[in-house]
Image (cartoon, rainbow, N blue to C red):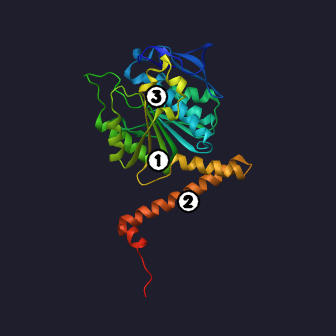
């Protein structure tokens, strides 16, 4: 489900209501839905009330436009061999839909949210889905800081629709800079040395530049990606996708790390033509990418210590 006018429900994936699938969670009535994303079929519970009718603390009980965008990003990562056997943290997971989708694609997943109904819903959906290796842990940043992940770091971190002002007190809406920096610092702390962060943001507050500045201040390299790279053009052009078209996509890594998806895909394509075993080809491509990344990081460190010595090397002449 998605929200076109941030309240009117629109289904962008094949979706059907489960006839016998209503339960109550701490006073909130939940409806079971079966959602198909490519070849993956998930049955999850979400709030029956529309997103605009939910309390601020319960917005995670629904799916949002950025959730759909992230689902397409996960399909892209799956097809590129970038999810299987990788550790993945879904921060602010809400229903757990995205993390469970990643688990179906072979990732080792931790669903995380602040303590409350969203975390309980993620735990409920995680136990019911049978989607592979999935854990559920409390994690929150800023003034509500809590961390049950115990210092673990992850190959992939998802931030989908965790940037919003649930009930704005002023217009125009704006994101809180201190909260953004706390989120960026927590994200950096949870990211492995060569890991990737994917962010989808519904852009209700036009806060993309605010978030990018916070991520850079925390020591993360920020790249805005085009939605068209991941979402089929025919879907983006449909009337039902007006809210989806506003979604911003960001890709983050530790500053100085230069592993690019394009290089990774190029190497996988190369090795898969030489090796029949898919998983062996995948290991070869990641090993080569890691070696390339170590060289690039070493070059950057040498540059910081010794300055730019490339011109001197290029002009070097043997004595005598």
Earlier in the chain: of badge 3 and badge 2, it is: 3
Label 3: state its secondary structure. helix
Any part of residue 158 in sight: yes
* Residue indicated by mark 3: 66
Q: Position of residue 315 (x, y in %)?
A: 40, 74
Residue depicted at 32% across the width and 47% down the height? 217
* Residue indicated by mark 1: 191
Q: 75 above or below 314?
A: above
- Left or right: 174 in relation to 114: left
Q: Residues within 10 Å of mark 3 (few under 14, many from 20)?
A: many
Which disc is residue 291 wearing? 2
Point out the image quarter for the C terminus.
bottom left
Mark 2 or 1: the one toward you: 2
Q: 298 above or below 226?
A: below
Question: Which quadrant holds residue 248?
Answer: top left
Residue depicted at 40% across the width and 52% down the height? 255
């Amino acid at each position: 489900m998605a929200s076109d006018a941030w309240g009117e429900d629109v289904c962008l994936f094949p979706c059907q209501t489960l006839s016998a699938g209503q339960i109550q969670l701490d006073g909130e009535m939940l409806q079971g839905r079966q959602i198909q994303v490519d070849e993956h079929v998930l049955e999850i519970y979400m709030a029956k009330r529309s997103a605009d009718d939910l309390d601020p603390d319960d917005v995670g009980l629904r799916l949002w436009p950025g959730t759909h965008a992230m689902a397409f990003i996960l399909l892209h990562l799956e097809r590129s061999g970038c999810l299987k056997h990788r550790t993945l943290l879904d921060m602010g997971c809400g229903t757990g839909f995205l993390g469970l989708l990643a688990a179906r694609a072979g990732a080792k997943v931790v669903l995380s949210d602040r303590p409350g109904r969203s975390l309980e819903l993620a735990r409920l959906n995680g136990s019911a889905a049978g989607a592979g290796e999935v854990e559920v842990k409390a994690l929150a940043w800023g003034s509500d800081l809590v961390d049950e992940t115990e210092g673990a770091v992850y190959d992939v971190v998802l931030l989908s629709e965790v940037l919003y002002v649930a009930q704005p007190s002023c217009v125009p809406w704006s994101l809180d800079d201190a909260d953004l920096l706390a989120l960026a610092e927590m994200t950096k702390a949870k990211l492995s040395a060569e890991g990737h962060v994917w962010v989808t943001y519904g852009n209700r507050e036009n806060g993309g530049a605010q978030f990018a500045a916070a991520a850079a201040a925390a020591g993360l390299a920020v790249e805005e990606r085009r939605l068209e790279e991941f979402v089929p053009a025919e879907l983006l052009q449909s009337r039902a996708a007006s809210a989806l078209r506003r979604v911003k996509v960001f890709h983050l890594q530790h500053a100085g790390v230069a592993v690019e998806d394009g290089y990774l895909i190029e190497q996988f394509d190369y090795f898969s033509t030489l090796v029949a075993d898919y998983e062996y080809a995948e290991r070869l491509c990641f090993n080569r990418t890691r070696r390339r990344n170590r060289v690039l990081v070493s070059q950057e460190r040498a540059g910081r210590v010794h300055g730019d010595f490339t011109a001197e090397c290029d002009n070097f002449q043997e004595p005598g």
